[in-house]
Amino acid sequence: MKQYRAKEVITLDAGSVVQLTEKQAADRSGRIERAGAGRYRLKDALHFKAGEAFGFEGEIPKALADLVEQVGAAKAVPEKKSDEGAGAKKSGGLFDRAKDAVGLGAGRE
């Protein structure tokens, strides 16, 4: 199940299967039914506020694709090869690789 965060208020259709926190499920208890551990089937259309995270089973509807962002699926950052000699100290720790991944690496600061 892919994890998403709403960029703005969205509505998911009845019948969708979502993953919710205990609090989210408690707040929506009359509009959902349990479909497994932490998973719920929507009995009615359900709204999510901007910034609210949820899991969604299957493909997110195309109409909502620009209104949500996928979270929790970290992209692998390839290891940089050093042009320096074999005895040189390796540069580019985890922080440096993370900066590179978000476009703040060398030459972009």
Image: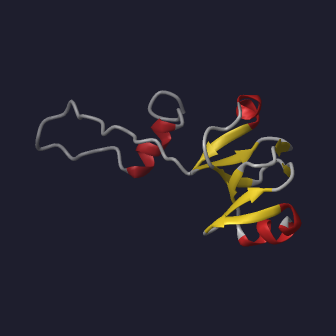
Of the pair 108 and 66, the residue shown nearer to us: 66
Q: Residue at x 66, y 47 (%)?
A: 4
- Horizontal side of residue 92 vs 72, given as left or right: left
Tell me if residue 103 comes above or below residue 43 in the rendering: above
Of the pair 86 and 8, the residue shown nearer to us: 8
Q: Residue at x 82, y 72 (%)?
A: 26
Of the pair 86 and 77, the residue shown nearer to us: 77
- Horizontal side of residue 35 vs 45, given as left or right: left
| Residue 98 percent coordinates (x, y) | 47, 44
| Residue 20 percent coordinates (x, y) | 70, 62
Of the 4 image quadrants, the one containing the C terminus is top right
> For the view shown, which residue lies furthest in the left direction?
86
- Horizontal side of residue 1 vs 41, given as left or right: left
Q: Quadrant of residue 32?
A: bottom right
Rendering colour mode: secondary structure
Q: Number of labelled discs? A: 0
Tell me if residue 6 comes above or below residue 27 in the rendering: above
Q: Quadrant of residue 41?
A: bottom right
Q: Residue at x 52, y 47 (%)?
A: 73
Of the pair 37 and 78, the residue shown nearer to us: 37
| Residue 43 percent coordinates (x, y) | 82, 56
| Residue 78 percent coordinates (x, y) | 34, 37
Q: Quadrant of residue 62?
A: top right
- Horizontal side of residue 1 vs 12, given as left or right: left
